[in-house]
Amino acid sequence: MSEEKYHKIPHRDPVTGGKLYISELTSEAGGVQIRGKFEIPLYARLDQEQSDFLEAFLRCRGMISCVERELGLSYPTVRARLDALLGALDLAPAKEDAGKGGVRRNLRAAILDELECGKITAAEAKEKLRGGQV
């Protein structure tokens, strides 16, 4: 079987706007057909921009500064797209630890993100970590 290009799964009825489901799966190689009512995967419901953002976010291991560089976007735009992606997936953001330890942990993580993305040197990161008593 040659490599075929498949279409993206539509998740809304173009006539009524209602939800769709997958009713048949086929394997040409095995000659198998499976029929039933299968849910469209959650991630298949994302539009192209959201899919591209998710891919970049995962490649950057969730480091927003890296996503900024990868996509050429500002921090507020990356945050807005991340919030929109969470909304599209019907997910709520995790609650951040507002205590003093949580602030230190977030600052330390931000410094390490800058280091990993090449924004600062190891010496600069060491100085920031020591200077802020993080």
Image (cartoon, rainbow, N blue to C red):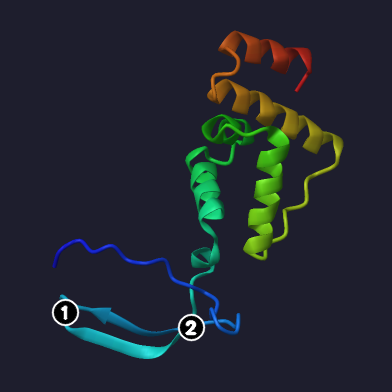
- In the rendering, at what x and y percent does residue 103 appear? 80, 34
**How far apart are the two marked residues, 1 and 2, measured between alpha carbons?**
23 Å
Tell me whether the residue at label 1 lies in contact with that at label 2, contact meaning CB atoms closer than 8 angstroms: no
Q: How many discs appear? A: 2
Disc 1 marks a residue whose amino acid type is Gly
Q: What residue do we see at 66% from left, 48% from top? A: 81
Determine whether, in the image, residue 36 is placed left or right of residue 79.
left
In the image, farthest residue toward the right: 99
Along the viewing direction, whichever of 29 and 98 lies nearer the viewer: 29
Q: Secondary structure at mark 1?
A: loop
Please tell me the numbered disc located at residue 66: none
Residue receiving disc 1: 30
In which image quadrant can residue 119 be found? top right
Along the viewing direction, whichever of 103 and 9 lies nearer the viewer: 9
Q: What residue do we see at 16% from left, 79% from top? A: 30
Q: What residue do we see at 69% from left, 34% from top? A: 75
Residue receiving disc 2: 21
In which image quadrant can residue 16 be found? bottom right
Vertically, is 27 above or below 37?
A: above
- In the rendering, at what x and y percent does residue 25 appear? 32, 81
Disc 2 crowd, CA 10 A, few/some/many (<14, 14-19, 20+): some
Disc 1 crowd, CA 10 A, few/some/many (<14, 14-19, 20+): few
